[in-house]
């Protein structure tokens, strides 16, 4: 079976290639998201239009409407159950026609690749100022490898049901100087998630990219350090896994373990 490659473009934006199929997770392709600014790394330069976009929940740093418009083309949009009306309102009926809603346990196929929705312990609403509601989910992509993209989540018991995996893309930080324990993973909880999911390889995401404008010096260790801390803690918590800390625009290619 062939190789699987991932390129991390900062925050939760990952370009995934598996079995000739290209997938893009939660794209942020601009240098601003509301009050957040891209503080490191280049603006993403994607190699083309993906076959499908995996959107984990409605928060603006994951379901970024301007970035979806910037993509162009006609990628399939794989969204959480309840998000299709938001797609119609923000992106129009044409985008809605290529949208697939999934709840945990549901699956769809993109070419030879199967995409299955899995749980996420996170608030799925657009925000406290919005009535837009949908689930929050993660995804397991099954092709040449089994890859878990966790979206944004806290720890949950069913993480053990995902095992074994070839690759896990695990959120380990946030986008501001405070990170609430509910619905998020920090480096230590990310290492525990890796232990439960039993992935051969892991890449930390959701850190080191976006930060509130004017707060660059406030708790900046929470911006810089989560990826390295996750790798260090995983050596003890999940010693059978290999962690690769990528910089924005860097890639990892793996072969399947089975």
Image: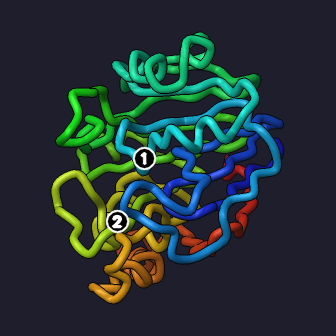
SS for dot 2? loop
Q: Is residue 166 above or below residue 233?
A: above
User: In the image shown, does 42 or 8 lie closer to the viewer?
Assistant: 42
Q: Residue 249, how many percent across, how many down?
A: 70, 67
Q: Residue at x 75, y 60 (%)?
A: 253
Mark 1 or mark 2, which is nearer the start of the sequence? Answer: 1
Q: Which residue is mark 1?
A: 151
- Decide: few, some or many residues near mark 2? Use Cα within 10 Å; few <14, some 14-19, many ≥20: many
- Kindly indicate the quadrant of the structure image that contains residue 35: bottom left
Q: CA distance from mark 2 to mark 1?
A: 12 Å
Q: Can residue 104 be spotted in the picture?
A: yes
- What residue is disc 2 on? 174
Residue 124 place in picture, x, y as percent: 28, 36
| Residue 204 image position (x, y, % from top left) | 49, 66
Q: Nearer the viewer, residue 69 or 193?
A: 69
User: To which quarter of the image does residue 57 belong?
Assistant: top left
- Identify the mark at residue 32; answer none if there is no mark: none
Q: Which residue lies at the image location 34% right of the left edge and 45% below the top edge?
A: 159
Q: Position of residue 80 (x, y in %)?
A: 40, 26
């Amino acid at each position: 079976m062939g190789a699987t490659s991932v390129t991390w473009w900062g925050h939760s934006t990952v370009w995934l290639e598996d079995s000739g199929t290209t997938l893009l997770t939660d794209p942020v392709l601009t240098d601003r998201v509301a009050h957040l600014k891209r503080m490191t790394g280049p603006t993403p330069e994607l190699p083309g239009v993906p076959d499908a976009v995996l959107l984990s929940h409605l928060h603006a740093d994951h379901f970024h409407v301007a970035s979806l418009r910037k993509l162009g083309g006609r990628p399939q949009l794989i969204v959480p159950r309840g998000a299709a009306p938001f797609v119609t309102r923000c992106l129009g009926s044409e985008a809605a026609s290529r949208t697939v809603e999934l709840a945990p346990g549901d699956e769809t196929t993109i070419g030879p690749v199967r995409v299955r929705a899995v749980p996420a312990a996170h608030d799925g609403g657009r925000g406290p100022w919005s009535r837009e509601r949908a689930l929050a989910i993660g995804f397991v992509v099954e092709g040449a490898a089994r890859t878990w993209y966790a979206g944004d989540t806290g720890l949950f018991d069913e993480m053990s049901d995902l095992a074994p995996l070839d690759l896990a893309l695990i959120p380990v930080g946030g986008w501001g100087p405070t990170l609430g324990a509910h619905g998020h993973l920090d480096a230590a909880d990310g290492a525990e998630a890796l232990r439960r999911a039993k992935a051969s390889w892991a890449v930390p995401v959701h850190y080191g990219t976006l930060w509130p404008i004017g707060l660059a010096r406030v708790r900046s260790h929470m911006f810089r350090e989560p990826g390295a801390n996750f790798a260090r803690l995983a050596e003890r918590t999940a010693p059978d896994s290999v962690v690769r800390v990528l910089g924005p625009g860097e890639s990892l290619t793996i072969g399947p373990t089975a």
